[in-house]
Each structure stands twice: as structure tokens, then as C-alpha cells.
């Protein structure tokens, strides 16, 4: 039995990322749902939505924070200072803080807490909701191996885990934290094209979805380079070559590179906005 079965976990912030993790944790039964809770700025309907979907607990804020073994910081980076200021007096150095915030350093979070609780910085993605997140973790200066083990268990329940140096988390954010959105954007474009070439929207969606799932499984299972798999599809002088030539003409690879670099730069920028106070 996992040690997490005896832990209580509170999400500070009850938005998309918190829900993705709660959904994955409840689905895997890693922590009983009555030992999970979420608090937000004041949107009670949202908390009720999470309660009815996942059966999580609804303690008062004081009990939710003071009674939590693990607090998952899941507010937007711009809201973290206020969010921690509001709960700081209820926290202790014995608690474990797991941050999913883009750009925000563990040192800054420790400075907001004002004590030596362990802080672990992570970058998951919303596919945690179905157990398929790609999450990278980095320990802050007060986190022990035991703290990391707990965090690894949590994120392994909702996908795969990589341990990285904290300064690499900006890169992870631009690549796999934001990554699902790049794929959804591709699907949006393929769907629009599907309709413009005369397919029913639903037919196009089914074909695109299976194409993406199939390609992802081929990449994962066949052990081949993506370029090799692409060549297998691309008959000389055929349809794929004609299509890819247009992508090349429009600078597809350059656009993808620039997109990811810009997302990384934005993460770094958000980090600089969070200046440690000590
Ligand atoms: N979405 C994603 O794909 C990913 C997001 N992240 C990170 O996760 C974090 C959350 O993002 P996301 O879930 O998308 O954001 P959302 O906007 O969906 O949710 C933010 C939540 O924070 C709450 N909140 C704001 N201020 C406070 C406060 N002072 N005290 C308590 N709760 C507060 C909001 O409450 P209310 O509704 O009441 O205002 C809301 O529940 C971000 O830091 C982001 O960088 C990381 C990986 C992927
Ligand atoms: O867009 C954002 O800032 C967050 C971080 C990674 C994914 N979503």
C-alpha cells in the first residue's frame, strides 16, 4: 500500500491543472478522495463542481491548509504571493509544498512561506487527467529524498516523470507543459482543412483523432526516429511529399522552433517577475 494512502492533500487553486491532477489521482485511487480537497479565491460553484465530479472533501480553509500533509500550489504565477500570504500563518515547515506554477522558483516560494518547508517545483501537463501527463520535477533546497519520493509517486500516478535541474524547468514548460496546446492547435487546423476539402466535420474529426493516436503509438512503440517513420509515409512524387513541401515552404519547422523558444522565454520572464524577498 502506498504511503500516500495515509496523506491528506490540498490544492491551493482549483482550476484546470488542479482538476487534471485530482481526476488522475482519484482515478488511480492513489489517495482516497475524502483526503483530497481544493480551495480557490472564492468561486464556490467551481469547488462544488469538483466535489460532485470526484467526491473530494470540503473542509473549511483553516482545516484544509493546517491539516494537509501536502499542499499543491496550483494558482497562476501572478496570484501566488497573495495566495500564500492568505494561508502562510496556517502552514508549518513539516508540510510538503508541490508547485505546478510556470516560471516560479522554489526559492521565491520559500521566501513567501518564510520557513523551511520542502518545496518541489514541477511542470506537468493537463493530460494528467487521463494518466498521461509528461511531468518534470526539481527539488528545492529544503526538499529531501523522501519528499521527492512522495512527489514522484503522485506524478507517476498521472503519467511519466523526469527529474531535472530546476533551471531546466523553463525548457520543460515550453516543450511539454504547453505541448498539448500545440497538438490541439494542429488538430484545429487539420479539422478546418478537412471541412474545406469537403469532409463532414465529425468524419474529419474521427479520422484525424485516429491518425494522431496511431502516429503517437508508432513513435512510442516502434523505436524508430520520427524522420524514418515520416519517410515510410512519403512515397517519392506522391501526395505526402507534395503536402510536406508546402509545410517546408511555409517554414513549419522554424515556426515550431520559434514557438517553443518563445514559450520558454515567457517562462523565464515570469520567473524574473518573481524576485525572492530574502
Ligand atoms: N493549464 C495548464 O495546462 C498548465 C498549468 N500549469 C500551471 O498551473 C497553474 C494553474 O493554472 P490553471 O489551472 O490553468 O489556472 P486556472 O486559471 O484554471 O486556475 C487558477 C485557480 O487559482 C485560484 N486562485 C487565484 N487566486 C487565488 C488565491 N489568492 N487563493 C486561492 N486560490 C486562488 C482560482 O480561483 P478562482 O476561480 O476562485 O479565482 C482558480 O481556482 C499555473 O501556475 C500554471 O502555470 C502547469 C502546467 C500546465
Ligand atoms: O500557459 C501557461 O502559462 C501554462 C503553463 C504550461 C501550460 N500552461
Image: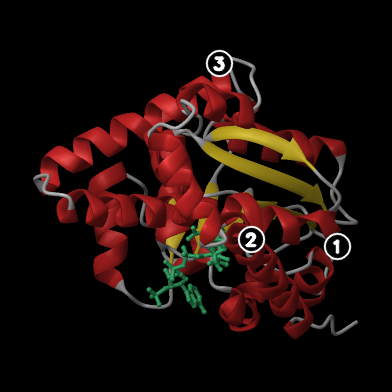
* Quadrant where the image shows the N terminus: top right
The CA span between labels 3 and 2 is 27 Å
Residue that badge 2 annotates: 254
Closer to the chain start, of discs 3 and 1, is 1
Residue plotted at (31% across, 56% down): 188
Residue 226, above or below 57:
above
Residue that badge 3 annotates: 221
In this rendered view, identify the residue nearer to me: 113 or 203: 203
Closer to the chain start, of discs 3 and 2, is 3
Residue 5 horizontal/vertical position (percent)? 54, 29
Closer to the chain start, of discs 2 and 1, is 1
**Residue 26 visible somewhere in the drawing:** no
In this rendered view, identify the residue nearer to me: 92 or 85: 85
Label 3 packing within 10 angstroms: few (<14), some (14-19), many (20+): few
**Secondary element type, mark 1:** loop
Mark 3 residue CB less than 8 A from any atom of ligand 1 = no
Q: Are marks 3 and 1 in contact (CB under 8 Å)?
A: no
* Quadrant where the image shows the C terminus: bottom right
In this rendered view, identify the residue nearer to me: 135 or 148: 135
Q: Are marks 2 and 1 in contact (CB under 8 Å)?
A: no
**Secondary element type, mark 2:** helix
Residue 32 horizontal/vertical position (percent)? 44, 33
How many numbered marks, from 0 up? 3
**Secondary element type, mark 3:** helix
Which numbered mark, 3 or 2, is in the foreground of this view? 2
Residue plotted at (86% across, 50% down): 165
Label 2 packing within 10 angstroms: few (<14), some (14-19), many (20+): few
Residue plotted at (46% across, 33% down): 131
Which numbered mark, 2 or 1, is in the foreground of this view? 2
Residue 9, above or below 274:
above
The CA span between labels 2 and 1 is 44 Å
Residue that badge 1 annotates: 116
Amino acid at each position: 500500500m502506498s504511503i500516500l494512502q495515509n496523506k491528506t492533500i490540498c490544492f491551493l487553486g482549483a482550476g484546470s491543472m488542479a482538476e487534471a491532477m485530482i481526476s488522475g489521482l482519484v482515478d488511480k485511487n492513489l489517495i482516497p478522495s475524502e483526503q483530497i480537497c481544493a480551495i480557490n479565491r472564492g468561486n464556490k460553484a467551481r469547488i462544488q463542481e469538483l466535489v460532485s465530479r470526484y467526491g473530494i472533501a470540503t473542509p473549511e480553509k483553516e482545516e484544509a491548509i493546517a491539516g494537509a500533509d501536502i499542499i499543491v500550489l496550483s494558482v497562476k504565477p501572478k496570484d501566488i504571493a497573495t495566495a500564500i500570504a492568505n494561508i502562510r500563518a496556517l502552514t508549518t515547515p513539516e508540510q510538503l509544498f508541490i508547485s505546478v506554477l510556470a516560471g516560479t522558483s522554489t526559492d521565491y516560494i520559500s521566501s513567501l512561506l518564510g520557513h523551511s518547508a520542502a518545496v518541489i517545483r514541477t511542470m506537468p501537463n493537463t493530460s494528467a487527467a487521463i494518466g498521461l501527463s509528461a511531468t518534470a520535477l526539481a527539488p528545492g533546497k529544503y526538499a529531501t529524498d523522501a519528499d521527492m519520493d512522495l512527489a514522484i509517486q503522485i506524478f507517476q500516478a498521472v503519467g511519466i516523470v523526469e527529474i531535472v535541474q530546476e533551471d531546466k524547468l523553463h525548457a520543460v514548460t515550453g516543450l511539454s507543459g504547453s505541448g498539448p496546446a500545440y497538438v490541439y492547435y494542429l488538430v484545429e487546423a487539420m479539422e478546418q482543412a478537412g471541412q474545406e476539402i469537403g469532409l463532414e466535420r465529425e468524419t474529419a474529426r474521427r479520422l484525424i483523432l485516429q491518425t494522431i493516436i496511431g502516429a503517437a503509438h508508432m513513435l512510442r512503440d516502434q523505436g524508430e526516429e520520427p524522420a524514418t517513420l515520416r519517410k515510410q509515409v512519403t512515397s517519392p512524387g506522391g501526395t505526402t511529399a507534395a503536402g510536406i513541401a508546402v509545410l517546408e515552404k511555409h517554414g513549419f519547422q522554424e515556426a515550431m522552433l520559434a514557438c517553443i523558444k518563445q514559450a520558454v522565454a515567457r517562462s523565464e520572464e515570469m520567473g524574473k517577475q518573481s524576485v525572492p524577498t530574502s
